[in-house]
Amino acid sequence: MSTDPTAEPILDVRNLQTTFFTEKETIRAVDGVSFDIRPGETVGVVGESGSGKSVTARSVMGLVDSPGRTLQGSSLRFTHLETVRDYTSKFPERTVEIDALRADYDPVDLFERDAIDISPTAFGYERAASVPLEDVLAAGYGEELGLVDDDPSVLVTKGSADSPADITDGFVELTHLSGKAQRLMRGGRIAMVFQDPLTSLNPVYTVGNQIKEALRLHQGLRGEAATREAAELLEAVGIPDARRRVGEYPHQFSGGMQQRAVIAMALACEPEVLICDEPTTALDVTIQAQILDLLAELQEERDLAMMFITHDMGVIAEVADRVNVMYAGEVIETADVNTLFADPSHPYTRGLLQSIPGRQPEDRLQTIEGNVPTPNEPATSCRFAPRCPKAFDECDAVHPVSVPVDDDGDDHTAACLLSPEHLSTDEAIAQHRRRNAKRNGGDTE
Ligand SMILES: Nc1ncnc2c1ncn2[C@@H]1O[C@H](COP(=O)(O)OP(=O)(O)OP(=O)(O)O)[C@@H](O)[C@H]1O
Ligand code: NI
């Protein structure tokens, strides 16, 4: 699984916050998550039950149900250029051209208006002049700042909205999609495979008809051509006797074959990004291995960007190029897969690795005591501290932010007061305090 580390991301997740407003409490299920995925790359998302993996995936898909909501300040950028051009011509009323705005607005003036309660630090910049207008719009503050009447879904950053074919840079902001623009994205450009194949398959239609429906919607194929393509897709995902089986119903398929059919359905839409949420958890080990091989093959053929969710470190080792470790709504460590296994930094990641059978001497299987807490308060401390073997006093007083683990610039970050590892603990804590203060708009922590 080699990917080009210099390639541009196709999906850029920035400060994603998805919260459930229940009668009892406010659950910050995803609390400021950032990462990106490149074409051909698999980003693994791992963590115990309740850490926010599925809500992250559902947020990207726009499938968060009430009482959940993705909050203002979150940005999910789909940067696939062809899609940006296509959406610019299909949804001109939802498109904004940054150059045209820049001519009319000076960001410094924007932030100086008295009525406005947003500071540049909310966007991770210290000075107003450094905040790109597209960040303001993507995070949903365009209306408040008087830039636009309605949050735009398509942001053209290089080129003119009048000439879609000549656009060279921009993104579709997934958090602002609705209606047809969302239907074309979901399934068409970004597809998802769930743990239980029966959530995706309708029991009353044949498998073939369901694939054909996807082909009609997203590729405009009908009739004989669609039937042929449906059988070819079933063949491509390794279903034997595909020509006959297109006429069968989901219940006539085994669990493994059902999941293959779901993958075929996802591929019928020719997506750029495939999100897999524990796609093999319900399957036995042999079938699981076959499905993982299949996904790897399909990814190679189609240069798919994949987000792969699992609580199984063994599966992560097999499928992922990069890994995000999640805990209580936050990404607490991120690294390329080899670094993560060889040199984990966060005590939580170390704990997860020690709970893989066969990875520790004397075959002692360690598990981390306790459970993931429900993140129902803003983070003002380390959410892992109560379970952490390394916890010390400050862990209850300072919220650790993601910082580079060391200074060799290899994109290995951890959200732990013991990082960066080359600093003394006091220096590291001071850095976390400063970064918190900055994020909260200059307040003291
Ligand atoms: N519909 C909902 N209403 C209220 N809270 C929810 C809802 N869906 C998820 N949550 C909460 O969001 C948090 C994250 O849940 P999520 O399903 O993303 O966890 P997960 O990491 O996918 O866990 P698992 O490994 O069990 O699938 C949990 O605290 C959960 O209780
Ligand atoms: Ni889940």
Image: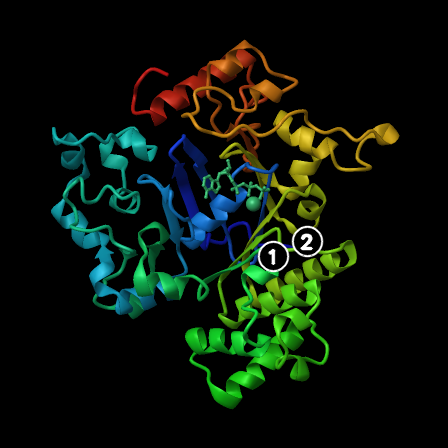
Q: In which quadrant of the rendered image does the N terminus lie?
A: bottom right
Where residue 384 appears, as percent x and y from the top left, is 56, 24
The image shows residue 125, relative to residue 246, as above or below, that is above
Lateral position of residue 180 relative to residue 282, left or right: left
In this view, 349 is above or below 272: above
Q: Which residue is mark 1?
A: 196
Q: Nearer the viewer, residue 400 or 377?
A: 377
In which quadrant is the C terminus drawn? top left
Residue lying at 52% horizontally and 24% vertically, measured from the top left: 383
State the image coordinates of residue 420 (x, y, percent, origin top left).
Answer: 55, 23
Q: Amino acid at mark 2?
A: Ala
Residue under the image location 57 percent in, 27 percent down? 406
User: Crowding near pointer 2: few (<14 within 10 Å), some, many (20+)?
Assistant: some
Whether residue 345 is visible to the viewer of this picture, yes or no, is: no
Residue 282: which numbered mark, if any? 2
Whether label 2 touches label 1, CB < 8 Å: yes
